[in-house]
Image (cartoon, rainbow, N blue to C red):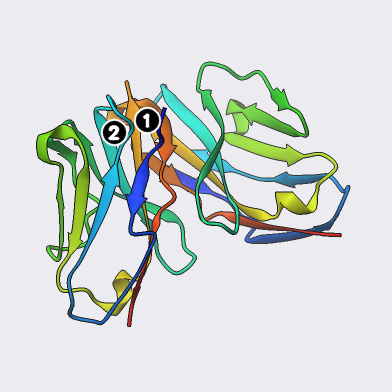
Amino acid sequence: EAGVTQFPSHSVIEKGQTVTLRCDPISGHDNLYWYRRVMGKEIKFLLHFVKESKQDESGMPNNRFLAERTGGTYSTLKVQPAELEDSGVYFCASSQAGYGYTFGSGTRLTVV
Amino acid sequence: AQKVTQAQTEISVVEKEDVTLDCVYETRDTTYYLFWYKQPPSGELVFLIRRNSFDEQNEISGRYSWNFQKSTSSFNFTITASQVVDSAVYFCALSEWEYGNKLVFGAGTILRVKS
């Protein structure tokens, strides 16, 4: 089975620009999570979708971040406008029945 | 509160040495899961193990072994006869059913294995 796919793998943008990250979960996985690791710190939870609904978005840092999951399939995470502190690696994970997470390879975002 | 502490920021060993990575967790839930992930230089997160709170048996998988002790809230990871390819960042993580099974990660331990 195909794994979790994220793209782009790398993105370099200027401060103030917009970037959209995409995650394609494993087919049939209802749960989709976004995490990020900033500047070598711990990996932190951003939000959790169950199908197309946001189950928990308590980790979203501010309203510059918008996540969507249309039709309960792929998800996008938009950062608008990007700030320097948004630089980091953004991971997506999917699971079924709440366990057995599979992570994507991550998107490395650099804001300059 | 949920918290995972990996006190070792960085460990350097010489190939063939054994190394133990420590993980201490905090939770108020009785049902939880503990994980270890490996992040090699290529960046992806590689799943190593998942343990539920009701199973305290130690586990061995090849050169890897895990020691789960609820009495000390620890879930330590040992690599026997380390190899250069083991060099990576290792993350311990906790998930609780009550919190939608989202993962709470430790800060990670950088392991450098020198030849």
Outermost residue toward the front in this view? A1
Mark 2 closeness class: few <14, some 14–19, many ≥20 residues within 10 Å: few
Front one among A81 and A63: A81
Residue occupying the point 29% across, 28% down: A27
Which numbered circle lies on residue B96?
A: 1
When the figure is inspected, residue B58 is found, relative to residue B24, above or below; the finding is above
Disc 2: which chain? Answer: B
Residue occupying the point 18% across, 60% down: A78
Residue corresponding to mark 2: B99
Q: Assign a secondary structure to mark 2.
A: helix
Q: Is residue B27 visible?
A: no
Which numbered circle lies on residue B57?
A: none
Percent x, y of residue B45: 50, 46
Residue occupying the point 70% across, 55% down: B87
Q: Amino acid at mark 2?
A: Tyr
Disc 1: which chain? Answer: B
Q: In the rendered image, which quarter is residue A26 located in?
A: top left
Quadrant position of the N terminus of chain B in the picture: top left
Quadrant position of the C terminus of chain B in the picture: bottom right
Tags 2 and 1 both on a single chain: yes
Q: Amino acid at mark 1?
A: Glu
Percent x, y of residue B30: 42, 22
Mark 1 closeness class: few <14, some 14–19, many ≥20 residues within 10 Å: many
Q: Are marks 2 and 1 in contact (CB under 8 Å)?
A: yes
Percent x, y of residue B99: 29, 33
Q: Assign a secondary structure to mark 1.
A: strand
